[in-house]
Image (spheres, coloured by chain):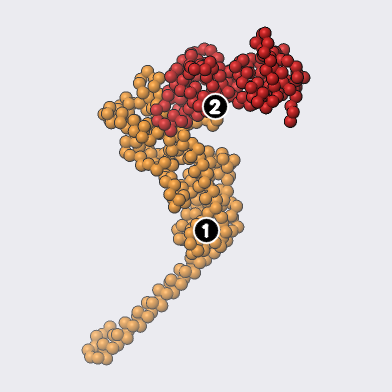
Chain colours: A red, B orange
Amino acid sequence: MALRRRTLPSGFTLPSIHSLHPFFTHQTVPTTLAVQTEHWTRLILSYARHARLFTLGVEDADLKTGPWADILYNPEIARSVKPAHLESLIATLVAQGKAYYDPPKQTRTVLLLWRTLDEWAEVLFTWASDTGQLNTILTFYEIQEPELKSELSGIPTPLLRRAIQALIKSSRAQLIDGTEGGGVRIFASTR
Amino acid sequence: MHRRAGIAGLERKNLSREAYSALQTKLSQQQLDAMQTQVDHFRTALQRFARSHRADILRSPTLRGAFVQMCTSIGVDPLQGAGPSRNKLAELTGLGLGEWQAELGVQVCDVCIGTRDRNGGLIEMPELVRILCRMRGLGEDGEGGVNEDDVVRAIRSLKPLGAGYEVVTVGDTRFVRSVPRELDVDQTALLGLAKRNGGVLDEDSVVQTLGWTNERARAGLENMLLRDGMCWVDEQDPRGLVYYVPSVMVWEDD
């Protein structure tokens, strides 16, 4: 049996291990499981980055369609990731700091951090600076749905808030309470 | 010789025996010397050859194999610095084969460890050679490539380090095992079957093909899975549990 890489119509290339039937079964042997989990978490994050997916939930498992079906389901070998398996993968992502539970106090849905919060903070700062919007008040909506598509298009509000918190920590932003969800003012770098 | 009685006869007999034995010693000494000279000549020739064709030897696997074999047959170790100083040829030729082999040994370790996660520490020889050739950016077995014999020699030279690398033969395929663990008879049979089935094993096929009882097949498969970590299990097959042995599967590089 030959295991091949497969390129999806979207241009994303699945690794050859994705065509290994047992890749979709939660392995029991610790060493094997560690390898499998490592491959899965890497695949989830790189696919999320490619497809700009921010959330992953246990509900995404075992579906033949949906945003995650391309990687959680392999129609060529009729195998799919089962919910319990996905939940444990999600737990690993959280433990590695590559995701966090959102909303908190549950373990079924996460926000994925294929960029760290500090990286998102930098992206936000660079974007504001490049578009000449430093020192002005920006609403969340203006950041999330800019007229010109940006790296930040579609970023979920909780993630954006955390990125802003990171900027505030380095004294480069200020949150402004407002009527419509609030806004943020980003200062020119003091460094 | 006509035998005569008396003291004189006995003395003569002793005398001739001494003469014969002296002659014998002289003759064998001469033979030994001649042999020594021949070996010396051969060594010199080998040295000259090694010196003038150093690059070729390091580049071509076939020539290297023949050369090493020749060295071994006259009792010289072509590995420079690998042994005590009686290793004259190697010192003189400065062939650097030892260094070359040590380097290959390190690469073998690299590949074995790097692929251990997917094959459980058992890699097929052709696959190993293929990866090594690619690592070195060279064609397979051709110009500058390495072949199975080179790998076998490199692994042998790793032995003193106690790395526990070993070449095992299953059916007609050689494997390199990088985890210190013996393959028992059942494991070997299962591995052979997996190899023929493209890496896929399940209890029924083992029972049918190898004529084992279900218990033995199940135990063997579970050992392979749980004890040796050599295979992955698929629970989504309608046939029941199916075991996959990645080390006998063909992987496209990612």
Instruction: Verify CB contact (< 8 Å) between mark 1 and mark 2.
Output: no
Could one spot residue A52 in this view of the protein?
no
Residue in front for this viewpoint, A150 or A35: A150
* Mark 1, residue position: B81
Residue type highlighted by circle 2: Gly
Q: Residue at x 42, y 46 (%)?
A: B164
* Mark 2, residue position: A97
Q: Residue at x 53, y 38 (%)?
A: B131
Q: Position of residue B151 (x, y in %)?
A: 48, 46
Could one spot residue B91 in this view of the protein?
yes
Name the quadrant containing residue B200. top left
Residue, far right? A132
Mark nearest the camera among 1 and 2 is 2
**Quadrant housing the C terminus of chain B:** top right
Residue, far left? B5
Helix, strand or loop at disc 2?
loop
Residue in front for this viewpoint, B22 or A133: A133
Would residue B154 be found to the left or right of residue B170 on screen?
right
Mark 2 belongs to chain: A
| Mark 1 crowd level (few <14, some 14–19, many ≥20, 10 Å Cα) | some
